[in-house]
Image (tube, grey):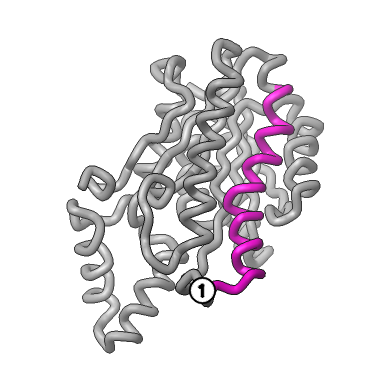
Amino acid sequence: MLEGKVAILTGSTSGIGLGVAKELAKLGADIVLNGFGDAAEIEKIRSGIERECGVRVAYDGANMSEGEAVRGLIETTIEKFGRLDILVNNAGIQYTAPVDEFPTAKWHAILDINLSAAFHGIATAVPHMKKQRWGRIVNIASAHGLVGSTHKAAYVAAKHGLVGLTKVVGLETAGSGVTCNAVCPGWVRTPLVENQISNIAAQKQITQKEAAKEILAEKQPSLEFVSPTQLGGTVAFLCSSAADQITGTAISVDGGWTAQ
């Protein structure tokens, strides 16, 4: 379905980003991975996808907290592959604290990576996508892009901002062959969520399993984690012709979280 297409996925060396990258590669897209991690492990992931899916896979370690680096990632990809068809803005970090205790540096870091990086990537990618009359921009937001939670001022603000940015870009590119949508996952068992589970387990002196159940019971009626593979399938659908008229919208994949 995606043979001949080129996809950039930010924050894709683990978790959701890697899950989405693998699904798009299975459909024939050439992939540009991005993110931090051990160089040998990243190379193992890169070559593994390339071998298993028979597509070209590159890695670019551009720092998503720096606007110029994000823009450079887009330009470098176009120079290397000759085109860019799919941009998945997934890079994200988290920090929790009451708003009156929230460190200013953490606020800026979260907005830079979770929101501004998507802006810089989109602003650079859109002209290229418009020129070829086809493009898919998918912003990985969160249930927290639609509803709030305590102690997550920066994350919720950034993810709400990402949903707003999605609407604007969807409107600005309507009819051009380019679409822009947000996917809003609930709890996904990523390293980010694993840390939160560990914190709850330590605070309440309960097991990891009990803490995981507690985190799900509080928000997610299905009582099951969303998987990166399921999110990859959602992104793949948005890249299909069935989704040609879906733009500027947010799709919840959250086990019923935001239906409450």
Instruction: Note whether 139 is above or below 142 in the view shown.
Output: above
The answer to which image quadrant residue 217 occupies is: bottom left
Q: Position of residue 131 (x, y in %)?
A: 72, 15
On whether residue 42 falls in the magenta region, the answer is no
Decide if residue 48 is on the left or right side of residue 34. Answer: left
Instruction: Note whether 71 is above or below 247 in the view shown.
Output: below
Q: Residue at x 34, y 40 (%)?
A: 252
Q: Residues within 10 Å of mark 1 (few under 14, many from 20)?
A: few
Q: Is residue 52 visible in the rendered structure shown here? A: no
Instruction: Give the farthest residue toward the bottom.
Output: 205
The total number of labels drawn is 1
Task: Find disc 1 in the rendering and name its residue.
Answer: 100
Instruction: Note whether 256 is above or below 134 in the view shown.
Output: below
Decide if residue 35 is on the left or right side of residue 194. Answer: right
Q: Nearer the viewer, residue 144 or 27?
A: 144
Q: Residue at x 66, y 55 (%)?
A: 112
Specify the amino acid type for callout 1. Asp
State which region is magenta: 102-128
Q: Position of residue 56 (x, y in %)?
A: 64, 36
Q: Residue at x 61, y 55 (%)?
A: 111
Callout 1 secondary element: helix
Q: Position of residue 49 (x, y in %)?
A: 55, 45
Magenta span: predominant SS is helix
Instruction: Note whether 210 is above or below 137 in the view shown.
Output: below
Q: Nearer the viewer, residue 3 or 105?
A: 105
Q: Position of residue 85 (x, y in %)?
A: 62, 26
Q: Residue at x 44, y 34 (%)?
A: 235
Q: Nearer the viewer, residue 115 or 131?
A: 115
Q: Is residue 73 visible in the rendered structure shown here? A: yes
Q: Nearer the viewer, residue 71 or 42?
A: 71
